[in-house]
Amino acid sequence: MSARIFCDPPLAARIDRAEARMCAEFAQRVGARSPGARVTTLTLAGGLAVYAGPGAPMNKVIGVGLGDALDAGALAEVEAEWESRREPVRVELSTLDDGAAARMLTARGYRLLGFENVLGRRIEPSDAVDAGAAVAETVTIGDEDLERWIRIMLDAFAQPDAGPLPTEEHPRGELAAVFRDIARISGVTLYLARVDGEAAAAASVRFDGRLAQLTGAATLPPFRRRGLQTALTTRRLADAQREGCDLAVVTTNPGSKSQQNAQRQGFELLYSRAILVK
């Protein structure tokens, strides 16, 4: 058994700032196809404030409070930009913040919406063996199977994972556009799991240096409880090992089935993020 992971602020910063880079590239892609979306990315206390269009799920401030002081003037600039777009400011703040950022945010009227958990797992040499291959055929895909991958992800979003954090709701057409943009972010690989030749589950991973971000997974209802999520996770871990990654991370709703599944596969809770909104 590998040693447990001790997550300190520098490790949390590594993870959260990889998430910030992914959100920023997503915004760039939205801006390229929709110039009127007024996308913007602002640096803030070592992290980023990202706006990718009205109500976009990537609209967030992330990576702050982890070694760089949050400046009230820079935060006010972000708030003014978002107010001009009639968009609430959403901050995903690591619980490893030293407390200064949290105090500033609450003093400025931010309210707590809920939490999300960040779980991690070391990548070991043994992960190079794809242990899920006996359960299902897992394949990486390109543009020819992108729409099938999107349909599976959309069907899963129609039946969200249970947990205490309110689930965001977006029209199906908007979510489809989101998934297309995510699919084209650098470092992202898409997967399908097939049962008897039929696409039954979908997943994705993003490689950011030596970090593997497990960025989504879904199974069609008729194929659930057959181990397809396990198969897709072990395939992604195998690919992460081959890519030279040393750590895999996944974000889940606290107390959810997704968290339970991740922990069964060796992921452990590293820290939580408080979701604060103004």
Image (cartoon, rainbow, N blue to C red):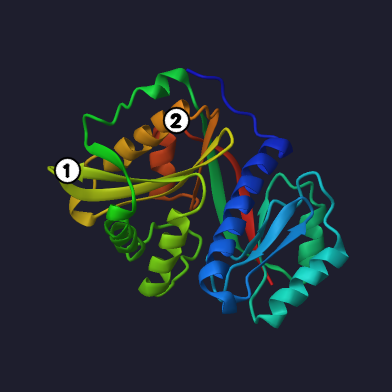
Looking at this view, is 218 or 30 the one in front?
30
In the depicted structure, whether residue 163 falls above or below residue 87: above
Residue extending farthest to the left is 196
Q: Is residue 58 visible?
A: no
Which quadrant of the figure has residue 105?
Answer: bottom right
Residue in view at x 58 percent, y 79 percent: 36
Q: Mark 1 — residue?
A: 195
Q: Is residue 188 visible?
A: yes
Which quadrant of the figure has residue 108?
Answer: bottom right
The amino acid marked with disc number 1 is: Val
Q: Where is residue 169? Give x, y as percent.
A: 44, 71
The amino acid marked with disc number 2 is: Gly
N-terminal of the two: label 1 or label 2?
1
Q: Mark 2 — residue?
A: 266
Q: Where is residue 77? Give x, y as percent.
A: 80, 71
Residue in view at x 63 percent, y 77 percent: 87
Tell me the SS state at disc 1. Answer: strand
> What whole-number distance in Å separates the C-alpha atoms at marks 1 and 2?
25 Å
Q: Residues within 10 Å of mark 2 (few under 14, many from 20)?
A: some
Tell me the SS state at disc 2. Answer: loop
Q: Nearer the viewer, mark 1 or mark 2?
A: 1
In the depicted structure, whether residue 90 falls above or below residue 20: below
Q: Assign the C terminus to one quadrant of the image.
A: bottom right
Residue in view at x 75 percent, y 58 percent: 43
Q: Where is residue 265? Give x, y as percent.
A: 40, 32
